Amino acid sequence: MRGGVIFELTHEGVVAVPVLRLDEVRAGTGEVVGGKAANLGELIGAGFRVPPGFVITTAAYEEVCRVADLLDGLPGSAPKIRDRITARALPPGLATAITDAYAELGSGPVAVRSSATAEDLPDASFAGQQDTYLNVVGAEALLDAVRRCWASLWTDRAISYREVNGIDHSSVRLAVVVQEMVDASAAGVLFTADPVTGNRADCVIDANTGLGESVVSGAVTPDHFVVSGDRITKRLGDKPTSVRAVASGGVETVAQDSAAPSISDEQARELAELGREVARHYGTPQDLEWAIGADGVWLTQSRPITTLFPLPAETEDGLRMYLSVNVAQGVYRPLTPMGVATLGLLATGVLRELGLSAPGARPAPFRPVDGWLFLDITGTTGNRVGRALLPRLMAAAEARTGRVYESLLDDPRLPRKPGATARTLRAFGLLLARNRIPLLFAGVLRDPARARAEAFRRVDELRAELASPEPRTARERLDAARHALLRSTAPRMAWVAPRMMPILLLSRLLPKLVRATEAEIHVVLSGIPHNVTTEMDLELWAIAQRIGPEVADLPARYRDRALPADVLRALDDFLATHGHRTAGEIDAGVPRWSEEPGQVLALVENYARTGEAGHDAAERFRQRAEEAVVQASEIVSRLPNRVHAGLANFLLDRVRQLAGMRELPKYCAVLGIAAARTHLRDIGDELTSAGRISDPSDVFFLDYEELSDLIDGFDHRELITTRRATHERELRRKHLPRLLLSDGTEPETLLATTGSGNALRGTSASAGTVTGIARVVRDPANARLSPGDVLVAPSTDPGWTPLFLTASGLVMEMGGPNSHGATVAREYGIPAVVGVPDATTRITDGQTITVNGSAGVVEL
């Protein structure tokens, strides 16, 4: 059979309807028509063993099915679409082309497989969304299977999958791959990287005897092999049946001995090596389907593994360990490229101010990848200080991260390094001495009121400096953005942080120092004053209580007209002070409340409604503060002697006076980031007006040097388009690892999941027990919580905290007892459990749950 155009039909001009041999469907030869077809064609061209066959290209699908005509009435008309396609007769010329090609294959049994243009994409595999028909025998059966493959593009599951992944239905076409059947003694799937742990060095094989349908469909528990170098780990599955070809066509399911392995160890090694070769060919880990016939191994499909988390680029040898900055900061979404660059500038400035880097040096070892920011912490495992101290620090900020880190300390690939402990202690001592941290902390403890006043004076000073006269040109604005971060914000952060961080350590030591339980200390840390975030929330609550429920229920477009004048003025003042904040606020690419005040209005509406229902957040906060004072007195009163009681009273008082200031370093950072964003937005407006970029937000998909080049005339539109696509893809990612190894392994997957059945276990963050309706929230912008609801979230930052005023409890997937969400939950006195793995998927919205903040348990 010759490839190329078989005949032509007319539909909106001349449309070629080709039938191509598989070996012609590869780059530079035939038409590339979809995932399976293109991949199989490339593999043939690269010399791999692929069953011979041919492709009915997307042009034939378009000619016969007329996609534009099919789309009327989706999704409700999907069954009618399928019926219309399967009932249509193929044009005679196309039918002849297909049957002629089939005859050239020998007219024997074939597999008929769907290959859509929206398939095997870098971020969505579409695995199993369209149909495959095995052991098709005869020309008429083949033509019928082709129509059914086309129709399978319009199953409910395929339509839903496209909608979830943002694929336009009208853009999708479907080719059909026809291949000779392999008389398989065994078949299955092969991943060239472990799809669960992420390890790029492991090949994972699922196998069963007979055809691969039983494995792919999930009809049996297959034999499972993991090939790591020469080592094989295997687990035989419960596979009571096997799918076999029937001589007359079609397949049947037959019983078999499930105790016997479906393939030998040697065959598993051969498959793994073959998989690695295919992965090398494509330059990315692959998901393969394979079959073993009498004459060896055949590949029937290859597609990229789309679920693997991307790896940071690394030039150093050996295994590296990365800590997620996103998780540590409670930002469960990718950062924009400019967001990453902005944090890098801030880190550079702060480290320079603390004497930890020389001018011009790179910041701390950040490792960004596709918008996710990691910190290389490999060096901490090589010395006793890091191994002892870091798990405790992690446990305070993000509880489960500390446990995952500890699980790696005995890994022989992360050895202890001679002299590393001494070097760490020396560097730490120099940091303390250079910045006079012990003296500073002593001064803060001696006079907390003066320390607070000075800290807030620095914040006011920063505000004033950032509000300096606006620059006029794009170049001046870019310089102003850098100056806001390096020269204005970084020095204030470096001044505040050394004075505030020891308070966090002291608060963690309180249970031992004053002989109290964790639950009692949680009460003491309720209703903490001088916290810029809780004060912001309570200010918004007070504004909302001026509004009647009849106003709050008005449609959004009328709300601003209906609000009383004094409320409008109060909201203006609120945004003038707090408009730089938002959810995900550490990313300069994220709009602020001042830009999108609808988020604030939604909170006001919810507050007004819940206040009318009898909930009073301000009164609840005041009561928690009173309970904290009573609890502190009780702790002091039961201590055995005056000295200990006096010390305990002093420590409890100082922690309550100072703990609220823990927000100030980040508060300064967000002020600086917002100021930089303002300058960058103005640059975007100017460059858009000049026709240099398509949209003002394009500037946030460059870094500072690239934006400088753009201002100078360099064209970065292609780079911006690519990065936007990457950002959109990563926004759909559902899971973010706390720690990641450079071989791709996510260490948490190697730990047993905590909790089972009706109980999920995490870390206690705020004492108390509450039962309520779970509200699973992934984006706070449009969340609605009624009094008594329990907020269940992946993580939180200050942009989330207004929701805490109406929540009765908090459950977070991320976080530790000193994380932002945990601290604010304690201050509001609501029970909280953090670090609960997969909480947002294991808890259903609307489900009744009990949050036991004292025990760190969530009962479903």
Image (cartoon, grey):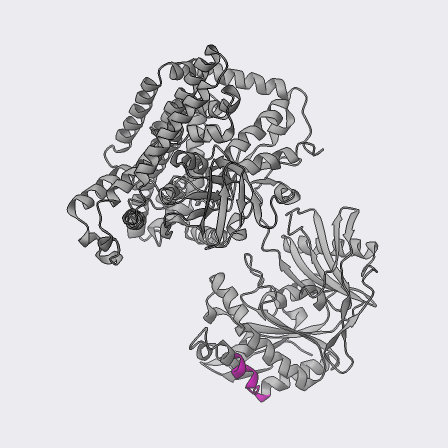
Of residues 104 and 629, the one nearer the viewer is 629
Residue 87 in magenta stretch? yes
Instruction: Where is residue 306? Give x, y as percent.
Output: 58, 55
Quadrant location, the N terminus: bottom right
Instruction: Where is residue 831? Give x, y as percent.
Output: 45, 39
Of residues 506 and 758, the one nearer the viewer is 758
Q: Report whether residue 671 is seen.
A: no
Residue 535 placement, left or right of 816: left
* Position of 495 relative to 768 (above/below): above
Q: Locate residue 538: give its quadrant.
A: top left
Instruction: Where is residue 18? Give x, y as percent.
Output: 59, 78
What secondary structure is the stretch in magenta mostly built from?
A: helix
Of residues 540 and 511, the one nearer the viewer is 511
Q: Locate residue 117: give its quadrant.
A: bottom right
Q: Magenta segment, which residues? A: 82-92
Tell me what residue is drawn at x 19 percent, y 50 percent: 563
The residue at the far left in this view is: 565
* Position of 332 relative to 625 (above/below): below
